Amino acid sequence: MAGVIRRQLDNGLTVLLKEQHSAPVISWWVLYRIGSRNERTGLTGISHWVEHMLFKGTEQFPGGQLDRLISREGGSWNAQTSMDYTAYYETMPADRIDLALRLEADRMVNARFEPDEVESERTVIISERQGAENSPLFWLGEEVRAAAFRVHGYHHEIIGDLTDLQTMTRDDLYQHYRRYYQPNNAIAVAVGDFNADAMLRRIEELYGAIPPGEPPQFFQRPEPEQVGERRVKVERPGNNQFLEVAYRAPAATHDDWFKLAILNSVLAGPSGMGGGAVDNKTSRLYKALVETELAVSVDGGLIPTIDPYLYDLTVTVRDGRTLEAVEAALDAEIERVRREPITAAELLKAKKQARALFAYSTERVTAQAFWLAFAENFESYTWFENYVPRLEAVTVDDVLDVARRYLRPQCRTVGWFIPTSGGDLDSLDDEE
Amino acid sequence: MAINGHSIPGPDTITRVVLDNGIVVLAYENFAAQSVVITGSLTAGALFEPAEQAGLASLTANALMRGTQHRDFAAIHSSLEDVGADLDLGAGVHTTNFNGKALAEDLPLLVDLLADVLRCPTFPPEQVERLRGEVITGLQYREHDTRYRANRAFREQLYPPHHPYHRGVRGTLQTVPQLTAADLAQFHRMTYGPSGMIVVVVGAVPAPEAVEIVRARLGDWRNPDQPPPPPLPEAPAPAEIRRTAVVVPGKTQSDIVLGVTGPSRLAEDYRAALLANSILGQFGMMGRIGETVREKQGLAYYAYSSLEGGHGPGPWSVTAGVNPANVQRAVDSIVAEIRRLISEPVSDEDLDDNKSYFTGHLPLQLESNEGIASSILNIETYQLGLDYLLKVRDQINALTKEDLLAAAQRYWNPDAFVLAVAGPQS
């Protein structure tokens, strides 16, 4: 991508800047290299909870004032905790960006973690988890992940296990914050309507004096090789059956990741990058599962991750059909793509789709800034710059090769969501 | 008018053309990215469907892309997916809307397809059956979705049975199985047409070119039988507190919807209500309701208010997801905030902050092609004037505390509202 400037401040903070003057808007991101992948048992969900605590305020920006200040200036802000990182952003009218710069510099070190705020947030987070639990796909995804990873931190949900959310202490949270929220463990990105020299000077003023910390030690346990198919069932009240099939996938830095991305496009349709989506009604699995009226939808998911994660296929079974029949039809397509090369036309389509989705993702400064920070976290922002060229380089033979190596039954986990009959619904009305 | 030298769409930059058949085309150029979006609406909404055929408008809109006189299902979707483009159509109560996106070079292809599916759908019976099965599976899924169930129960209590807002646009497990391909074809023949249709194109295409692309494909469309939209029945405000509870087994959280009938987008006090709603349950981290229910008491991950305000008196409501044991506590807190909103004027700080938010947020809303297109569609739909985005700041700044109080008092009554709760047996 033309025009990305990369600087490292003396305290280790990585800064990426890209001027874009199409709209009077700037997006500012600060990403910390810490996510659920580095969490120990007993502390699962801690990265996400710490993220919540950073909205509770500092001396300079007391809780309740923060959101007021941002909103008053017409800004949007939020944060996200992933398996591989915790990131915060503000997108502001360009002439109001200084507030976001000051706010993030302040809460990099000065978040308060008041004990009563920790307690009130405990129930908010448990409520967030319980809200997610109301979806059958949450239960299925959690079980599939736990079965697919026995050792690696990817085995638990980002939100954490309920028991850990009930027992974690204020000190656990605060230690996590002190250990990982440091300039030398952070990536800061601005994209939008600014002058890069002036922006860099202001960032140095605000962030340059924050002392670096001990280089953080990351809790990491590599997952051993999978040596046989794993199967899980979830049985809960509901009306619908779901199938999730998850294959071990390579890390995002690996060339194979890009080959699998093309394969995913052919099998289940391309993944959006923020800014616009492309449907999957001409994909192989849609034809094999939905057009045959076995299923009502199929989705493929291949997330760029630091460590090898999963390539998963999720299917909603059509009313009156069985999980066995859907799985058999899916297997037949997987076998086909491992037996015969995809067509040149399929390859071309997948590449054009990638070009379009990439173009859509660059429309908004928020999405661009996200991708730069995200890619820098596991490799370099150039991963995002080179995204389309690396996909362009994939050949028909490459796709056959990754299909054979990654889509093996021995390295997959199959999950079934089986609705139980407790699904009768009552309606109780009374008026007063 | 400009912000930092960037122009805000207005009469000088939005091209507006009325085609001979009545279609209003609006085009706005944005060369910042190589993409283009097309969005718009037709008057063919669920208003036209009888209650026993609930879901007809929606199924018709969803079936348009299942086959036309010129393209079968595969050809329709290949033409889009081969070039990384997308097109969606869906019905609401008042209108059927479409949204498309493509690389700028593919706009003619996108409009070709849009015109074909709108004008020449064939509703192939086997495709309609397939789609129906998908819709039914979706409806079954929603039976177990607490948020959806609370919302549906809320609407059924708030609006009388003959009112179109009483029922869901997607239909029910009773009505959808009865709809036939012939019903869809008839609904299409009767309600689809150029009268009242709006098309907005925003992106890296010169505006005159965009208008001609639309004119060439939709300019000769005629439907002499197209009827005007039927009038909306009265929707009286609740006269007492009406509670309804839906038990959804196996869930860990309950969803609450509490509310009243609100203003339409065209109501004089709509903007005052919008600002009052922001203070109640939007601003910052979900306004006053977020402050008490989430921040102070830790009862919920989400607790916010919303004001629908479309063509008719849509709901003004509060939504929260809480542990089943905390439902009453959350409801009491919400009602207390509503009492406060109607009994005392908001503070100067609340008023200023919220005005500043609405006026300051404009550049962010107008950052993407989708954002610009939806603003322009809104302007045309509600006849706000092409200079709307230029003057809205002054209109918001002119609002007073008394305006907000009067709007809140007009719609809310803490002793008369609908409360719907969906969750596990408590």
Image: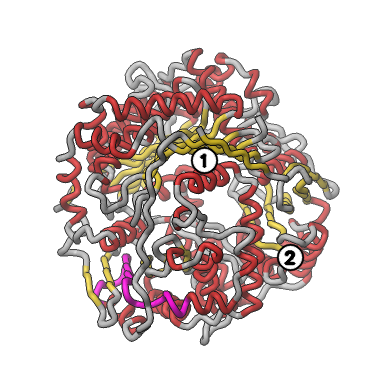
Tell whether B224 sits left or right of A170.
left
Q: Which residue is mark 1?
A: A377
Residue at x 24% of width, y 76% of height: B18
Q: Which residue is mark 2?
A: A294
The quadrant in which residue B36 appears is bottom left
The answer to which of B113 and B309 lies nearer the viewer is B309
Tell whether A231 sits left or right of B285.
right
Q: Is residue B207 magenta?
A: yes
Q: Amino acid at mark 2?
A: Leu
The answer to whether B300 is drawn above or below residue A381 in the figure is above
Q: Is residue B47 visible?
A: yes
Q: Is residue A323 magenta?
A: no
Residue at x 49% of width, y 44% of height: B157
Q: In what element is the residue under mark 1?
A: helix
Q: Chain of mark 1?
A: A
Q: Compare marks 2 and 1 and give the one earlier in the sequence.
A: 2
> Could you say where residue B413 lies in the image, as x and y percent from the top left?
36, 33
Q: In what element is the residue under mark 2?
A: loop
* Residue count near mark 1 (Cα–Cα under 10 Å), binned few <14, some 14–19, many ≥20: many
Q: Chain of mark 2?
A: A
> Which residues, given as a range, are shown in magenta?
B188-208
> Could you say where residue A83 lies in the image, as x and y percent from the top left?
60, 38
